[in-house]
Image (cartoon, rainbow, N blue to C red):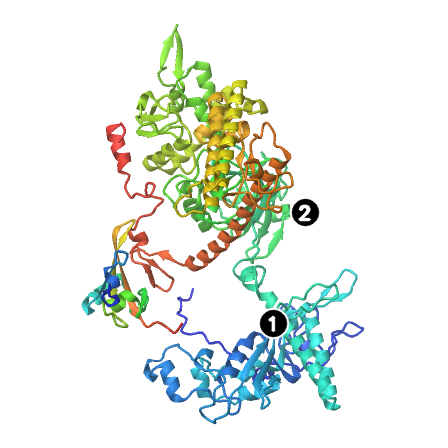
Amino acid sequence: MPSPKRVGKIEFGLLSPKEIRKMSVRKIIWADTYDDDGFPYPQGLMDLHLGVIDPGLRCKTCGNKASDCPGHFGHIELAKPVTHVGYTRLIRKLLRVSCRECSRLLLSPEEIYKVLGPEEERNTDVITEKDVKKERICPHCGAQQNKVNFEKPTTFSEIWTDENGRKVDHKLTPADIRSRLEKIPDEDLRHLGINPDVARPEWTLITVLPVPPVTMRPSIILENGQRSEDDLTHKLVDIIRINQRFKENQDAGAPQLIIEDLWELLQYHVTTYMDNEVAGCPPARHRSGRPLKTISQRLKGKDGRFRGSLSGKRVNFSGRTVISPDPNMSIGQVGIPLAIANEMSVPIRVTPFNIEEVRAMVLKGPVRGSLTEPCGANYAIRPDNRRVRLNELTCETVAEQLEPGWTVDRQLRNNDIVLFNRQPSLHRMSIMAHRIVLMNGRTFRLNPAVCPPYNADFDGDEMNLHVPQTEEARAEAHMLCSVYNNILSPRFGGPIIGGIHDHISGLFLLTHTLRWFDKEETVSLIKFNPPEHLPKPGKVENGIEYWSNKQVFSMILADDLNLVYRSSSCKDCEVCKKGDCEQDSYVQIANGQLLTGTIDKKSIGAFKGNILQRTIRQHGQERGAQFIDDFTKLSVRGIMFDGFSFGIDDEDLSKTEYKQIDEGLDEAMRDVKRRIQIYEEGQLEPMPGRTLEETLEMQIMQVLGKARDKTGEIAGRHLGLSNSAVVMAVSGARGSMLNLTQMAGCIGQQAVRGERITRGYEDRTLPHFKRGDRGAPAHGFVRNSYKSGLTPTEFFFHAIGGREGLVDTAVRTSQSGYLQRRMINALQDLKVAYDMTVRTTGGRIIQFQYGEDGTDPSKACFGDPVDVRGVLENVLKEEV
Amino acid sequence: MDTKDFSVIEHVMVPEHHVMTREEVDDLLLKYKISYDQLPKIYHDDPAVKTIDGKVNDVIRIVRNSQTAGRAESFRMVVKRPKK
């Protein structure tokens, strides 16, 4: 590898007509492409001098065949100059800062000095349009200047008032502009930031148009044998046709009007040839009505040359399919359909040590019918780099020829390492390395515990898979990207992989309060992760040994774990009863034994899991991953022990509760009515900084909000931990008490932008209400619950509120996506150097110490570099 | 208050700025093994730079309170602000 070189400077210039003619191999004059025999016309757009695309023919310029000829430029001599759409801004600037008579810069040397400063201090500053006052007199020749108007896309005109006080609008033709720009002296151009050696301004007006080689606008042959030309060729045909007509008319001395029309038409074609999406210019269309994809469109945007072909491209050795869950796998594994494993391969070099093994693979060929069969091979690569496709015919001969020096593309097999990815790849955990498990079926399988980092679910999500092809790539994947290395997030120093949904519900049910299991039950709970020995039974009654539920959970904990914290079911009581907590939410773990407390989201959940985080800090990532695998399996057993389901009757309350809810809501309605009455009588005291209406609205919202919460309390009193939704809400597995309130009690006020719904008809939201009605039902209060069902007006208001949420998410995702893109573009090349400075690739310092404290957040403890609490807890074994 | 008496440097939100001496700068460049143009930059018309009378090509030491590290030092070279 050559040593890296520093870019000294980059020069941006314009192509001069002279250069265009010099690089051109052929002047193009015919608009036609192929004659009746399918042979290109000489001096036509497909001239053989411009390169060849048909196999068999030879290029008339370089003599190479289609595969080797890079293509060569031709040129078209335009009858009259036209403006280049890409440089209209520059042309406008130059016209405005230069004199219309002598073309010198409209500033005297003193004025230039004033703007740019003394000669030796001048940097990259240049003179702009604003430095020149409008419609002044030229300081060099004394000519009166006129206002130069620019009209999109390519029209320039001068405006002045004549002696009679009338406004005169005089159009500047490209030829006029060209002759003006030609006269601007080189020295003046340098003040304007233009290097006249590489970019004379008159070159922005095209007199000679380069014709790109046929290799960049190949024609394709359709199934019916017809040729279909590239969009660029179509556009060039248009240009040549009009140019030809223009010339003929010009030579025949046609009237000025016709010449002008043709000139404008030529301008249009040249403009759309370069950019077919210019403002104020109808796009040129294909016969089918599709807008043509011209030069600018090839480069721009997501699928353009830069973003589509250079920064990112299609890759080989990758697969994509739907994902589905498999809780019996390890988090570090990924299940792969046999069909994909057969198609994708890993190259292995044949050596004397593995030749027999590889020969067996070659002999097996590309067909692998079942999971149990050993892997075969798809290709063999000879020492001279020739690829031989293996099939029933070739595999035997190849197996005989095989010797060290060959390379064989082996099919994937169990325990191969692959990179697994889900878009949008917003953080580094969006691509992680997994180990393969071959599986039947057609989907990728993954442990549901790795869903949070990928942000994946199983409602039809698809994911991508890439197979590293070299030993280095596999080593990097294993050591840097493996799932185990990414359990702790670099964002906040806590686990991002952890229990979700059923894992949390399951362990909550298993560990809540004290329960006893006999030997059979205990063993069935831990049969997927059995310890070497069962611990000593917690109690023996009538000669039967019993183990407590906390003992069962403790079997998967590391032995020296010491933790004290409050679980997510903690109600923040004023005086904490600690070990005697009624909710059993005071978690105490001493020497790897769960003494009190319930395991829930705060213990094992993704983003929060305390136990998980401590296990990884004390015992490393492998043990942490082991713990995740263990508790996912234990939780599945735990949730199956009692069963877990939710039905419509789980939202039922008793008569007394319904009565209480009704009374509560009636009372709220009366309260609202009373407040409205106070307002209408003019007795309402406005709150500081609010109008009367705002005060009333706030009061109503508050009253109704309270009423809704009250129904929730009533419902919550009836629905205890025997209700699955309550279990999920309390344990933090999914949903909240608010969801339950809305199902069983009352849905509550629907809001748009945080206010009651007010829009609709004149003075009312719907024709079902009286004009000016300020009552709760008329402004989107839904009194019913999802269980009891909504009235038609309530349903409508509910739809309004729901729609706002959808619109918000749609807007947010697109905005944050763009923000993310800009951030990545700005930060992508920064790295932390060995002296802990953050630097760019050029060695420029961005931060003198990474994060100002030089700590890696993924090695820190929720942001703190040292886990003081953890150390103390380990020593004291009690709450710190 | 007379506006002429106001100095941005005294505001609580403005971190300490000091112009570094030649020797200090040489030590700094040596410590990080960098050249002048690899330092972060600050404009010559920055209000804080103007108050401490920093000139173009001076290096300013900025000491600010940091959420993560308590106090953090950084160094910026004064450059002339380009037009616009």
Q: Using the rendered image, report if marks 2 and 1 lie on a common chain.
A: yes
Which residue is at the front of the view, A171 or A435?
A171
The secondary element bearing badge 1 is classed as loop
Q: Which residue is mark 2?
A: A393
Tell me the residue at 29%/64% (across/down).
B76
Q: What residue do we see at 57% from left, 84% from top?
A: A158
Which chain's residue wears label 2? Answer: A
Examine the image and state in which quarter residue A858 appears. top left
Is residue A838 something one can see in this rendering? yes
* Mark 1 surroundings within 10 Å by alpha-carbon count, few (fewer than 14), some (14 through 19), many (20 or more): some
Q: Secondary structure at mark 2?
A: loop
Sequence order check, earlier mark of 2 and 1? 1
In this rendering, is residue A111 above or below B75? below
Look at label 2 and name its amino acid: Leu
Kindly identify which numbered label has been placed on residue A70: 1
In the foreground, A635 or A36 = A635
Please name whichever residue, A340 or A304, is drawn nearer the observer in this view of the structure: A304
Q: Residue A480 location, x and y as percent?
A: 41, 47
Looking at the image, residue A66 lies above or below residue A686:
below
Residue lying at the far right of the rendered structure: A36
Residue A311 pos. (x, y %): 52, 60
* Quadrant holding the C terminus of chain A: top left
Amino acid type for the residue under numbered disc 1: Pro
Tell me the subunit letter for badge 1: A
